[in-house]
Image: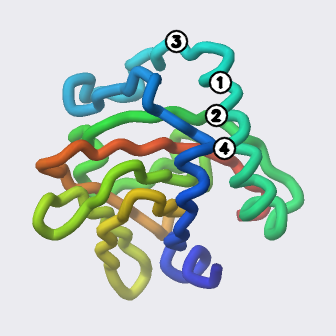
Amino acid sequence: MESFFVKGYVRLHEPDLLSILDISDMELIDVEVNDDVEDVEPPPRTPEQLARFDAARDYLIEKYVRPLFSEFTFLSGNVWSGVDSGSAKFHNDSAEGQNCCFLVYFDDMSEEVGGALHVKYPGGVDTVYCQRGDVIWLNQQTKFLHKADRASVLRRLACFEFNVKGL
């Protein structure tokens, strides 16, 4: 977990989370079509779909957030495909009120297909090609920046945003 504080992220592998948050029946926000993600209303979710989001959120809280932080607020969660133009440039999402988030990957990324996540931290930049079942826990402190590359294949992610006291 040290890299969360030093490099601004930690890469986890949680394939069980894909079963908990089954997105096969969910409408995704296509952020390459709806480029200004902040203005897009999330698709309506059924009670069953919302229950799966809640279960995935609770899994992340109990396994990762609560063992490190006693006070936090869950802000939102959603699932999308693609990479919007703002996410393709180095940025930090703390201005949106979050100071950390979990990105859950539903597809394999690689040098061949693209879809890399780049994280800039004091002293360097890491490039990560996530695989199905990978989870990136991003630290949104302003000293860390990140960006994503577009992919030639489907790139579906769920995002769970938090505000953690003391981070």
Could you tell which of marks 3 and 1 lies nearer the N-terminus? 3
Q: Residues within 10 Å of mark 4 (few under 14, many from 20)?
A: many
Could you tell which of marks 1 and 4 lies nearer the N-terminus? 1
Q: Is residue 32 left or right of residue 160?
A: left
Q: Give the residue type that dot 3 points to.
A: Pro
Give how far apart the Cα atoms at labels 3 and 1 are: 10 Å
- Place of residue 11 in the rendered image (x, y in percent of width and height, measured from the top left): 50, 71
Which quadrant holds residue 149?
Answer: bottom left
| Residue 139 visible here | no
Q: Reply above or below: 90 against 2.
A: above
Give how far apart the Cα atoms at labels 2 and 3 are: 13 Å
Mark carried by residue 53: 2
SS at mark 4 in the image: helix
SS at mark 3 in the image: loop
The residue positioned 36% from the left and 64% from the top of the image is 130
Residue with the mark numbered 3:
44
